[in-house]
Amino acid sequence: MNIRFLPGKLDGKMAAPASKSEAHRAMICAGLTRGQTELKGFMVSEDTKATARCLEALGAAVSLSGDTLTISGYQRHTDLMPVFDCGESGSTLRFFVPLALILCHGGIFRMRGRLSQRPMEVYEALFVPRGVTWHMSEGADGAAELMVTGSIPSGEYILPGNVSSQFVSGLLFALPLLSGDSYLHVLPPVESEGYIHMTVEAIQKSGIRIEKTGDFAWKIPGFQQYRNESSVLGGDWSQAAVLMCADALGSSVTVSHLSRSSVQGDAAVLDCLKKMGAEVLESEEGIRVVSGGGLHALDMDMRDYPDIVPMLALVCQVAEGESRLRNCGRLRLKECDRLAGTVSILNSLGGQAREDGDDLVIRGVRQLKSPGFVETFHDHRMVMLASIAALVCDGPVEVAGAEALDKSWPGYLDAYRSLGGLAQ
């Protein structure tokens, strides 16, 4: 689907959509209970659909009524090889592999898009020496398939922290279900700390006991059972960051349904924009960012919040001076190479951006110029980047593959238009 975004401003009030990261975690905790759990404020996306399919493969029941997702926890253990259709969701894949080994003695994981290219060697190196068989192949329809068979024992697990926090979360979900105590230790440097904190928070809310024994190290007792805990899902800071960066560029959107006490790492967007000279206004109605047109360069380590890098890079592109967003290497392992994609889009708009190792370096320009069409690499974050860039361009910006938005925020175009954004 081609969409043409026109220059203009966004204006109004908008509730942040439900956090996809929080939803994944709450869904899995609910699926591991023996009761029924309601998750209110749920937003359907392609990624959360993938997690729902995988819960059903475990034997859970999932149903949606309005914005309430009801999950009845799995009722059976099986020796069959269930098929886990992960779509393009990296979180789903990495969260369910250890669960499948413990609960089902393995499974077949189907992957679409670039998912099969994203690193899985951490699990392979961890599980194969413990007797798990690991085989990657291609299904009859061309989709990549990973088959794992076996089980994993309780014991000591040591993970590198510089690949993806999703491996850590996968083990945090699974190890409490084993028959003995386990010890999990993550080696520094640790990527995306906030996502690990989200997982710890989610499992503890569901009655799981873990004992912190050091920085990113825990003792995890075995023989535990998840407890059903209905809740209202919080707002997504990574999606709210899109609107807040639009604010910094001259729009006027008040974003509500966000918790300032959230452990979501992407809440750092406010600190980043403050450092660039923007003012953050908080009220009962929500949060609004005001720049006054006086933005200056940003030098920031982005290791813990890569998802907001593309939008912050756009703000940096029209700020005065040279910005450096550091430690962005994980962006290369997303739905597209987002580091290269961000550079490509900004430069196609007349910007001055480049990669410097794992850093993104942006020299500010006075005005972004319309190239007509920009390539967004079928990546939802790149489509959002183009849509906000169009607001401050001297002409329209057209993209193809706007359906990629369904992966994380299917209602994005409706929200954009409701705020006055021109999308044809």
Image: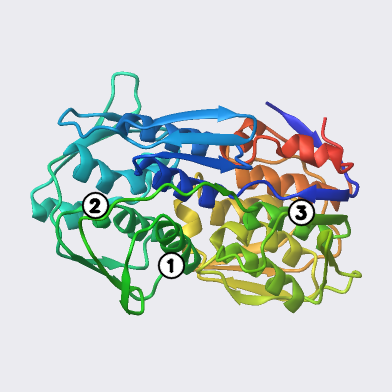
Q: Are marks 2 and 3 in contact (CB under 8 Å)?
A: no
- Res. 191 mark: 1
Q: Nearer the viewer, residue 216 or 88?
A: 216
Please indicate, yes or no, whether residue 97 appears anywhere in the rendered image: yes
Q: Quadrant of the C terminus?
A: top right
Q: Nearer the viewer, mark 2 or mark 3?
A: 2
Residue position for label 3: 243
Residue at image coords 52%, 51% = 21
Element type where label 3 sits in the image = helix
User: Residue 104 falls in which quadrant of the image?
Assistant: top left
Mark 1 or mark 3, earlier in chain: 1
Mark 1 or mark 2, earlier in chain: 2
Residue 119: x %, y % from top left: 33, 51
Left or right, residue 399 beside residue 294: left
Mark 2 or mark 3, earlier in chain: 2
Question: How far, Cα to Cα, is label 2 from label 3?
Answer: 40 Å
User: Residue 300 falls in which quadrant of the image?
Assistant: bottom right
Residue at image coords 65%, 53% = 235
Report the number of numbered marks. 3
User: Residue 254 falls in which quadrant of the image?
Assistant: bottom right
